[in-house]
Every structure is written in C-alpha cells, then in structure tokens.
Amino acid sequence: MKNLLRLITLLVVMTLVLSAVGCQGRETSTPATEASTGAPAEAENITLLVWDQAARPEDSAIMDAIVARYQAAHPNVTVIREAKTLDDLKSTLPLAMSSPEGPCISMINQGQSDMGAMVAAGLLRPLDEYAELYGWYDHISPGLVALNSWTDDGSQMGEGHFYGIPTHAEIVGVYYRKDIFAQYGLTVPQTYAEFEAVMETLQQNGVTPITYGGLDGWPALHLYSEIQNAQLAERSWYDDFMFLRGNVTFDTPANLEAARLLQEWVQKGYLTEGFEGIGYDDSWQMFSAGEGAMMLTGNWLSADLLAGPNGANLGFFLVPPLEAGGYKLNVGGAGAGYGISAQCPYPDEAADYINYLFSEETAEALLAAGSLPVYPVDTSNLEDGLLKDIVAAWNFANQHDAVGYYFDWVTPTMYDTSTAALQELMANQITPEEFVDKINADYVRFLNSR
C-alpha cells in the first residue's frame, strides 16, 4: 500500500561504460578493512554492483542520470545498477548478499522479515561509523534512525546498529482545495478542533469534507492513525508499541477515543457517501476531478493531482495537534534504506556512493522529478504551491522527530486484522471498544509467540 512516489519528469539518460561485474575488479590495492571509514582512494579502479527499486522506466532513467553524475566526479568508480521490484528484493536479496558475487549495495526493506533477518544472518555491514563520518544523523530524525536499526541478533528493531539510509520519503496529510476554502472563509486549521470545525462547515454547506474510498481497506488505516496521532500528543507509547518492547497495550484511552471519533466522522457525513464501495484509485480521481474539499492521503499522489484539472488550486497540510504548536506524530516513513553487504570488499567506496545518494544535490534532482526526498530541501527556492507545501510538511515532521508509523507493520497479521476491524467500525458493526479489543488481541498474540 505504501507505494514509491510517482515521478513526473524524465531526466536525461547517459550511457554508462561498464568495465566489470559485482563487487570485484579492484586493480591496484587490497580491500578496505572492516575498521576503515576514511575517504576512498581516488586512484583505485573499482566496480560497485548496486541493486535498487527504480524498476519503472521513469525511475530508472532518473537513477541512471544520478549515477552518471557520480561517475563523472569519480572516474575511478564504475557503478552497475540493477533495478529490482520489491518482491524481487525480498525473495532474492538474502541469497545474493551471502555471495561475494552479489551486490555491494542494495536497498533493503525495513522490517523483521527483511532487514532484521539479514542482520541476524550477518549479511549486512553496520553503517554507524559512516553515518557519523558523513553526518547522516544530522538530516534524519531519531525515529527514522530507529526504523533502520537492529540489535546484533536481528530480534529487536529500534536498538543496536544502523544498517540503512533511506532516500525517498512518505508523509500522509490533507490535500485541500484552496478555492473552496476561500469560498467559505476557511483557513488551514492549527488544532484538531479547528480541523473538525472545517469539516463541519463544509458538510453544513453541502460540500463533501473528505473524499474517501474504503473498498481497498488500507486507506482506513491512514484515517484512523491520523486521528490517533492527534490524541496521543507524544511518541513514547507508539515507539514501545511498534518496537515490541512488551510494556504497553493497545487498550489505551487515546486509541479508544480515536476509534470513537472515526466512527463519528462517518455518522456526521464527513466522508464521501457510499465510500464502502469506492476504491482508492477511483477516490483520488474523483477528488482530482472536483469531488470534495479535502482528501487525507500521502504525498505519492502529488504528481497525479498536480496534473489534474484542479492541480493549481491544491494545497497540503498535516493533520494538526490537539493544541496549536503542540506535538503530533504524522503517518509516514521512508522508502527502503541503502545498505552495504558484509561481503563487499569496498565498504568505503560503497559508503561514499550512498552518501552521494543521500545528499542535497541528489535530493534536488529527485524533487525536480516529482519525488519527495528524505534529505531536507530548502523550500525558499520553491514556488508557492502544492509541492512546496508537501516538502515543508516533510521537513517539519523530520526535523521535529514527528514522522510516525504505519501501525499495521507491527505484527505479521496486523494488516488483515486492522483493515477488517476498521471496516467493521466504520460500518457501525462493532463498537470502539470492540475495535480496540481486536487490535490488542492480535498484538498480544504476537508478543506471546516470540
């Protein structure tokens, strides 16, 4: 459900002259030692095999251009990139990383079944020293560091060593029609109460407050989680919950209140009528065509919505906290992180390449192509409009350690449990208390099985 961002502009593809394969081919020196984290030796000719997820032609063209710019500045390095789908990475990467012929660098999906399992198998090189050397921690929030950190045995996320640096960001917020807001004298809300007041004003004037399709199940996770985040007002409970620290329960007043409020949104008519039978793709196309004043979803729709008939009238804001200026998590995260194989004999050069991917220059190239980079981009250089709003929202969340979670990640069965329970809740088939019980039962079962 958390698709990588749609990209809207093709960059120039430059032809690469490839001289070797895999992590082999250094002609003049011995491999870097495990402790080495110095600058790469520019005179050495090496080849780096890189696996990434830029499988779509548009994505691949962008990455080829980025690689070409890197190689122009590092003529001793040949980068061979192979594009893989997420499914390909999940099924083939562990075996490939166990071989010296495998990739030196790869994007690695966060989570127990991917990054955690590879850490447990000793397939990944910790990146802590490189993160310090290049200052990566200065540009990503502690929460994002935690999502890419594992204990040595791969059993616990959020602790231990750092294994992957993501380049693409995701943030969920509210797209809104500026012309409709102006028509009814509405402004971007600064508190959760103001947000609900905006919805009430729109509904009373016959305008659908939030365009929404619930047929696919997963969009309800975003609705619930954004309400939930506003009620929490801090991240300590959520961190313990997501990182399975075993001292929390889902049965809390904040989670119960969020379920009650979501059910109330339905009862008050804040969502598209008949949303139960509307798919996600249909819902955003309806919003793009002019149906409704707002849509609560992620930045991955920005390119499509900008290209639509109301693109020039759209803005974006984060669901606000309970109190103006208060703290609130925001549903989001980052794409798969770039990691280094434990088999790679050129860790310094591999880290240098990753550092180029996680840089202001690359971030600006990704943004120009319609992608939201993790690396903070200076919004003063952007024209006012939807893209600037989204970048500002991400920068705010990242800088304030307010990038939250997709809570269905937490157990292998939570996605099915939560989407089914949310559909029942929004259909008034279960009470908020019963919803909380269903989520908590799934969580407790998994904790007890570990």
Image (cartoon, rainbow, N blue to C red):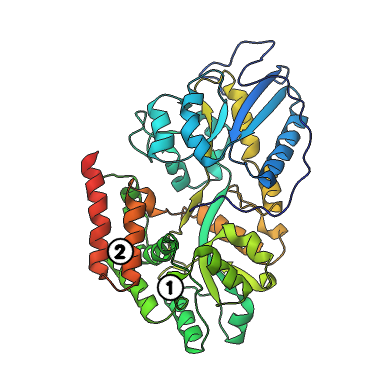
Picture disc at residue 182: none
Residue, disc 1? 192
Packing grade of label 2 (10 A; few <14, some 14-19, many >=20) is: many
Judged from the image, the secondary structure of the residue bearing numbered disc 2 is helix
Q: Residue at x 58, y 86 (%)?
A: 185
At label 1, which amino acid type do we have?
Tyr
Q: Residue furthest left?
A: 448
Q: Judge from the rendering whether residue 405 lies leftward or rightward of residue 385; answer left or right.
A: left
**Location of residue 339 in the rendering, given as x and y in whole percent from the top left corner:** 53, 32
Residue sitting nearer the eye, 64 or 83: 83
**Location of residue 286 in the rendering, given as x and y in whole percent from the top left corner:** 57, 72
- The image quarter containing residue 269 is bottom left
Quadrant location of the C terminus?
A: top left
At label 2, which amino acid type do we have?
Asn
Q: Residue at x 63, y 65 (%)?
A: 305
- The image quarter containing residue 150 is top left
Q: Residue at x 51, y 35 (%)?
A: 89
Q: Earlier in the sequence, mark 2 or mark 1?
A: 1
Q: Nearer the viewer, mark 2 or mark 1?
A: 2
Q: Residue furthest front?
A: 277
Is residue 332 at all visible to an observer of this figure?
yes
Residue, disc 2? 255
Is residue 250 at all visible to an observer of this figure?
no
